[in-house]
Image (spheres, rainbow, N blue to C red):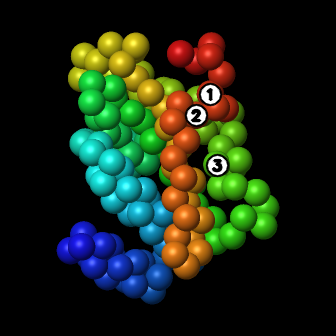
Amino acid sequence: MIGAFLDSLRQARLRKSKDPAQADGRRGEDLAHRSLQRKGFAIVARNYRLPSGDGQADVIAWDGDTLVFVEVKSRESADYGPPDRAIGPEKLNHTVRVARAYARKTDTPWDRIRFDVISVLLINPPAIRTLPQHPYVPPTLF
């Protein structure tokens, strides 16, 4: 519960300093992070960027012996479809690039890598949906 309280304080500060879309994105990431922790994932990184700045993973976590790269998408409503529909081929390619670099850095075999998406609707209460093994990642990227 302390984590949720700290998240709410951070959100209040972000709403004052960032544009609403950035604050909503951070709120969605905070909610996704807490959801993964409750499910027993071991979070190893948030907003991990390649040194080149050419790619970023919202969350990297261990689910047992599988290293999971999680893309978090948030929206205030489902009027334009679920948030995960906003993930395009360019974002997928960046995420795979980050995963390859991180896997090399940590000596993690590629067959122990998974790509998940967490879709967050920022309604009251927020609706959080995890999509294991993102359906839009083409098999050729693995």
**Left/right of residue 61 with respect to residue 96 in the rendered view:** left
Give the residue at mark 2.
134
The N terminus sits in image quarter: bottom left
Q: Earlier in the sequence, mark 2 or mark 3?
A: 3
Tag 1 residue: 137
Q: What is the spatial separation of the Cα atoms under label 3 and label 1, in whole angstroms?
A: 12 Å
Viewer-nearest residue: 138 or 104: 138
The amino acid beneath tag 3 is Asp
Mark 3 element type: helix
The label on residue 84 is 3
Pointer 3: residues within 10 angstroms few (<14), some, or many (20+)?
many
Q: Secondary structure at mark 2?
A: loop
Taking the spot 53% from the left edge, 16% from the top edge, the residue there is 142
Residue type (three-letter) at the residue carrying disc 1: Val
- Dot 3 or dot 1: first in sequence order is 3
**Circle 3/circle 1 CB separation < 8 Å:** no
Q: Nearer the viewer, mark 1 or mark 2?
A: 2
Q: In percent of the image, x 33 and y 26: which residue is there?
A: 66
The part of the image, by quadrant, that contains residue 52 is top left
- Cα separation, mark 1 vs mark 2, equals 6 Å
| Viewer can see residue 127 | yes
